[in-house]
Amino acid sequence: MGLMDKLKGELVDIIEWIDDSRSTLAWRFPRYQNEIKNGAQLIVREGQKAVFVYRGALADQFEPGHYELKSENLPILSTLQGWKHGFDSPFRSEVYFINTRPVTDLRWGTPQPVTVRDPDFKMVQVRANGLCVVKIVDVGIFLKEVIGTDSAVEVEEIAELLRRVISMAFSDMVTQSGLGAIDLQGQQVALSGRLAEFVQERVDDEFGLAIPEMTMNISLPDEITQAMTRGVAKGVEASGFVENVDLDKYQQAQAADAMLAAAQNEGGSVMGDIMQMGMGVAMAGQMANQMGGIGQPAAAQPAVVVNPGGAPPPLPGQTMYHVDHGGNPGGPYNMAQMQQGIQGGQVTGQTLVWAQGMAAWAPAQAVPELQALFAAPPPMPPTSATPPPVPPSPESPAPDSTPDAPASDPAGE
């Protein structure tokens, strides 16, 4: 600083801070050797607070207004410097201007996903991001813990600190809430206020900051989002059918689709083979009817309703059974198919089955409708080792068992 600047500073002394960047949180007023003369003018604008610091100790604070610096309005500084009857010009002190306006554009996000226990999708990793509103409320703590000896403090200098604090607070809030991933995303507006409280507890006494408001957006993995989208679309489609489609026919079509899926099972189960055979017979019958109708008038041909699944739907009121195939449910199967499976040995009395109206899976032999299929046939009558004698015929005479008498010899007489 030159001689003219020094003389100008001693003659005119106006202390103020003009800043419209909204990115500076604190700024130290530059003075030659920190000298302030008696009667200097202090101007503190709205959204600011002026703080005097003497040898590292916090002194007097000034709210927005226009002040003339005298010993009367500097009681703490007068005590620190030992002014008994006023002070001589100039005196030395640092002056800091603090931005008390809220900073509304501080963005945050979790650097690593947080694992959440979900009742539907088990363990799910979620992320969160949003905006944080921060404000300086305790100048003394902020001056000691954040400013230190810096001449200025920008928002970006505390942004990284706040992001770490918010990430840890988000993880603690999720764990304490006990909500699943779907519920977290559904209640993220209400949870934003709780997250602000968690963060407030970590920055008020530590850094002199307040968190008036926070916004939060929780994002789920793409796999979970796609599964939810498919489920919603299927629900909307099914609800639209309720008003326009006969529910009995719709249920029959659903059962036919399930039968087709069982028949196309590549696992090679015998029940699947039976289903394929039944479908083949049905398709052959349809083809025969179509071939037999060639050359006949169209009016004479009866209307044939073709099932898109390739197999006729179950008859109304017919009980359809699902069968346990080694831990994988199969079916549904009608009574005739169940009888074929029992006769073939694929379905035993201990095989678990289920049908509409049953409370839970039960052994097949315990189902009253299926008990008759397990009844063993009566044994065959025993056969003799040798056949019985043939009875005599009534037409043939009985042979004479008495031998004939010998004839007399006339020569011997």
Image (cartoon, rainbow, N blue to C red):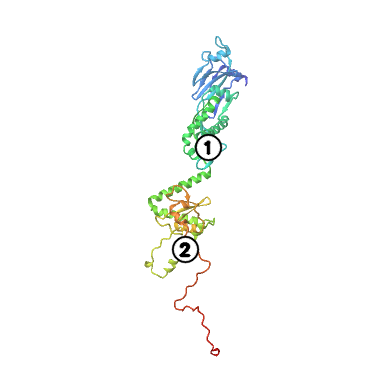
Residue designated by label 2? 281
Measuring 58% from the left and 13% from the top, which residue is drawn there?
81
Q: Nearer the viewer, residue 209 or 378?
A: 378
Residue 35, numbered label: none
Horizontal side of 242 relative to 34 (left or right) equals: left
Q: Are marks 1 and 2 in contact (CB under 8 Å)?
A: no
Q: Residues within 10 Å of mark 2 (few under 14, many from 20)?
A: few
Taking the view exactly as shown, the residue that stands out farthest to the right is 2
Q: Amino acid at mark 1?
A: Ala
Say what secondary structure mark 1 lies in: strand
Residue 363 visible to the viewer: yes
Q: Nearer the viewer, residue 128 or 69?
A: 128
Residue 288 location, quadrant: bottom left
- Give the position of the N terminus as an image quadrant: top right
Say what secondary structure mark 2 lies in: helix
Q: Disc 1 to disc 2, how far (Cα)?
A: 58 Å
Residue 275 visible to the viewer: no
Where is residue 228? Give x, y as percent. Answer: 48, 45
Residue 372 location, quadrant: bottom left
Where is residue 23? Give x, y as percent. Answer: 54, 30
Taking the view exactly as shown, the residue that stands out farthest to the left is 299
